[in-house]
Image: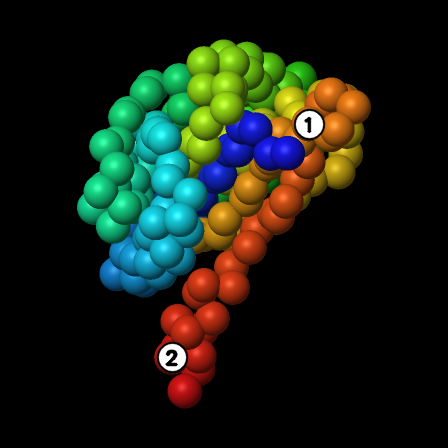
Amino acid sequence: MITTELVFVRHGEAQCNVDGLVGGPRTCTGLTNRGYAQVEQVALRLAAEHRDRPFDALYAGPRIRLRQTAEIISQGLRLPMYTDDRLDGPVHGAADGRPWTEVKTAADGGPHAHPDRPWAAGSDTWNGYLARAGRFLQELTNQHQGERVLFAAHGETVIAAHTLLLGIPMASPAGFMVSHGSITRWQHHVNRLGQARWMLDRHNDTEHLAALVQKATS
């Protein structure tokens, strides 16, 4: 039996992604036209699911690209949207707005490369972000036991959920690809013996975006 379900939608393509910039609060200007199209396809897919097994809540972080993603899903599912600052991505500090290539060169790699060291002045550490995001996701999971919850999320939030629910050590060198407009789903299962565990139903599912890929290549 499935009890709680957590469904994460990574935001659609944003302008800061196209420009290769660190998209912190000062820099994020929202989704591109392609990003809007990606999220519209997500909303269509989730709306069909919502009719049979309604979602109970929709959360988004505060950055523009997340709120725009959640707004499209909210309209498609007719589900209220809640914005919570604790669902924001990592704090980038002085890296906000700079090209990622410059930031990674100066830091000798991306945030994951030296997980206990800030990648710019005033930034998080990668492990610090994972711990903070994991604590909040655990709080939300406890709050919504037995419910289906949707998130318009950063890719880093999806990774934080995996780290929490899989019990991955903070220092693990492994990582996860999280594409724009992808769906990741966690389900809490309880078997006939009353034994419970989280199971990853799908990760980085982009099947609903196939029509956009075909259109772009035709």
Q: How crowded is the residue under tag 2: few (<14 C-alpha within 10 Å), some, or many (20+)? A: few
Eyeballing the image, is 169 above or below 200?
above
Q: Position of residue 54 (x, y in %)?
A: 37, 40
The residue sitting at the bottom extreme is: 218
Q: CA distance from mark 1 to mark 2?
A: 42 Å
Q: Is 175 or 134 nearer to us in this picture?
A: 134
Question: What amino acid type should be assigned to the residue bearing mark 2?
Answer: Lys
Q: Position of residue 216 (x, y in %)?
A: 39, 77
* Residue 215: mark in rendering: 2
Q: Is 211 or 201 nearer to us in this picture?
A: 201
The residue shown at (68%, 36%) is: 199
User: Horizontal placement of 9 versus 26: left or right?
Assistant: right
User: Horizontal placement of 108 versus 141: left or right?
Assistant: right
* Residue 190: mark in rendering: 1
Question: What amino acid type should be assigned to the residue bearing mark 1?
Answer: Val
Q: Quadrant of residue 18?
A: bottom left
